[in-house]
Amino acid sequence: MTLDGRLEGKRVIVCAGSGGVGKTTTSAALAMGMAAEGRRVAVVTIDPARRLANSLGLEELGNEPRLVDPRRFAGHGIEMRGELWAMMLDAKRTFDDLIARLAPDERTREEVLSNRVYQQLSSAVAGSQEFTAVAKLYELHRSGDYDVLVLDTPPSRNALDFLDAPDRLTSFFEGRALKVFLAPTGLAARVVGRGTSVVFGVLTRLTGVDLLEDLAVFFRALAGLIDGFRERAEGVKALLRDGATTFLIVTSPEREPVEEAIFFRGKLDESGMPFGGLIVNRVHPLGTDGAGDVRDIERRLEAALGAKLAAKVARAYAEERVLAERDEAAIERLRVETGDDDPVLIPQLDGDVHDIDGLVRVHRHLLGH
């Protein structure tokens, strides 16, 4: 089974799942394959392996998509009829850009971006990449510059963090604690009150940093951005639920990623977000060659390989067989629990995928051509 046909009419494809299951490779291979079909595709990657990044020219990229030179694909068995654009997410830069767009005027924008309190806070917020990833996705979608967007979601122990990111931001801005802080008689007002100003005055003389002024500017500017943040978060949620968006759950047959995939599938349903299919990476295929048990294999190989080498080959076969049976059981469970009767299965490849040839191999399993 491949994804060919499942992605018809989709403009936003989100590759989600736990960390370490091959989401970045899957995202890049899928985007490359769709671009080869003639579409203008942008893939937003989070942290590609260095050699894979180099093969696509990503080491030169900033926080905006750039066209991957189609000549990079020459001689690799794929014809690039469309355009592949790629970028690596710079979470801090994305958050700064969002502030710049939401600021009501240039003065507010400069006050916030240059504010020391904001700089520390934005680094902390951006460090958790989930909201900045969907914010960049939303921005690229609104631009209308691309036929398809493919998002490689941030690595996470819990893929649900990605779905919750817009709601968490909205809850923060609508939360009681922040409202109390920003109220005229709240904590922010007391911070700039007469008693604390003496303390801050001493700190200013000792450190040269006017923390009182920084706090006052930060909270004044923040009050003017709340509506914009709320509207943006609602726009992001609407995009993730749109009929032209689909979520692909990427997993491996290992126990923890399987549990995560099943849990995430349920949360997609609860959140009203569209499920496009399951991709299981690094599968050990269970052959049907009827090779027999280990002792039988060892006896048949002994004449050609010698007893010692034949025993090693037989043991290696037995170990591979155990892994294949484990994977088959995990895949059957995924079929039952996620409702996807025909998941895309990508076999365990030799070594990590780090170049165009590796992407082409993965792409053929994904799209079947």
Image (tube, rainbow, N blue to C red):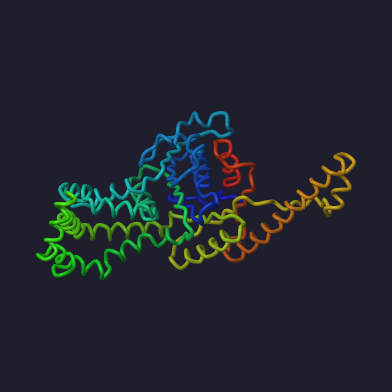
Residue 14 coordinates in the image, percent (x, y): 46, 53
Seen as rendered, the residue at the extreme left is 194
Where residue 128 sits in the image (x, y, percent)?
38, 55
* Residue 217 occupies quadrant: bottom left
Quadrant placement of the C terminus: top right
Q: Nearer the viewer, residue 75 or 58?
A: 58
Question: Measured from the top left, where is residue 105 in percent x and y?
Answer: 16, 49
**Residue nearest the viewer, comparing 122 with 346:** 122
Q: Quadrant of residue 212?
A: bottom left
Of residue 348 and residue 92, the one placed in the foreground of this image is 92
Q: For this rendering, which residue is in front, 75 or 223? A: 223
Q: Is residue 101 left or right of residue 360?
A: left
Please give the name of the residue rendered at 44% of the width and 54% of the height, measured from the top-left corner. 245
Q: Identify whether 31 is placed above or below 238.
A: above
> Residue 164 placed where, x, y %?
40, 62
- Decide if residue 7 is on the left or right side of residue 125: right
Q: Residue at coordinates 23% horizontally, 51% vertically from top-left?
A: 116
Can residue 81 be seen by looking at this rendering? Answer: no
Q: Is residue 230 visible?
A: yes
